[in-house]
Image: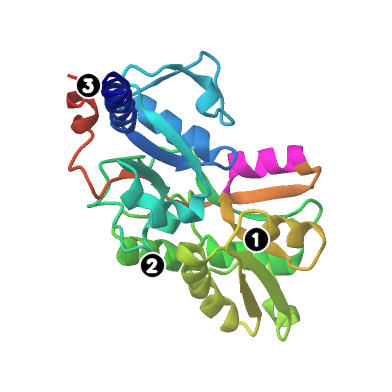
Amino acid sequence: MKKIIATALVLTASALALSSCGSSRIKIAVPNDPTNEARALMLLEKEGLIELKEGATITATIRDIEANPYDIKFEEVEAAQLPNIIDSVDYAVINSNYAIPAKLNPKTDSLAIEGSESPYGNVLAVKEGNENKPLIKALEAALKSQPVIDYINKEYDGSVMPVIDEPFENGLYPELNYDELKGKKITVACSPVPHKDILEVAKTILASKGIELVIKEFDDYIIPNNVVEDGTCDANFFQHLPYLNNFNKQNKTHLVSLGAIHVEPLGVYSVKHESLDFIKSAQK
């Protein structure tokens, strides 16, 4: 009987040791949506933590990791939930539009972050064929304006970066007859931060010409595209171009970009570690 108990204790100790060993792996949470997961993985690759397969593109997932020298365990999480689970993992790769409402400052709190050269600028999108409608052109000019650039720079101080190439100085499209648009309404679907706040600047510009901008907030990445495709909303402002292109391909929608407004850099955050160096040191 003593031998059986002793054997059981040894097996239990071994199991606990294995469990402890397994739980000691570094855990990194990444977005689970198309393109943003690849974006997160490319940032981690840039930091020298993983290597992706040759040819891995903007739709890469953790299954496209070629080398994982630090034996990192990845958890794919819905993007909006990443700030909520940050204390249950070692690191989380979070988009600025979710980091900022969670009181995470991308500029000062991130341990690694994308730069302004990121190709993931958030765009104004409409249904194909509506690009040159007067109300759309009015909205485009208001959003691609110097007041919007000034607002982003002042409000976000590098946490969100404007990428408007040729801004309309006063937010007005020079060839439009704004008198004909007075009293009309345009509806835009968006995500809360920073898109809604940026649209509020455009709303003031349009209101000065008698145009009402109706802003409708959504907390996901699907509905804002669907409501533009079905005509419920005239435009949306929440996504980057790679995501839009992938969405069109997957859902047979017909949305087009009118250009990028800003970049929300993706950053790596942690409440447990002060730097990414812990990942490498943990393996020594």
Give whichever of discs 1 and 2 has the lower sequence position.
Answer: 2
Q: Residues within 10 Å of mark 1 (few under 14, many from 20)?
A: many
- Give me the residue at 49% from left, 57% from top: 167
Read off the residue under disc 1.
Answer: 236
Q: Is residue 188 in view from this perspective? A: yes
Numbered mark located on residue 151 in the image: 2
- Separation of disc 1 and disc 3 at Cα? 45 Å
Q: Residues within 10 Å of mark 3 (few under 14, many from 20)?
A: few
- Give me the residue at 70% from left, 84% from top: 182
Q: Secondary structure at mark 2?
A: helix
Q: Which residues are magenta?
A: 240-250
Q: Where is residue 253 shown, x and y percent of the image?
A: 79, 47
- Tell me if residue 79 is in the magenta stretch: no
Residue 183 placement, left or right of 197: right
User: Which amino acid, mark 3?
Assistant: Gln
Read off the residue under disc 3.
Answer: 283
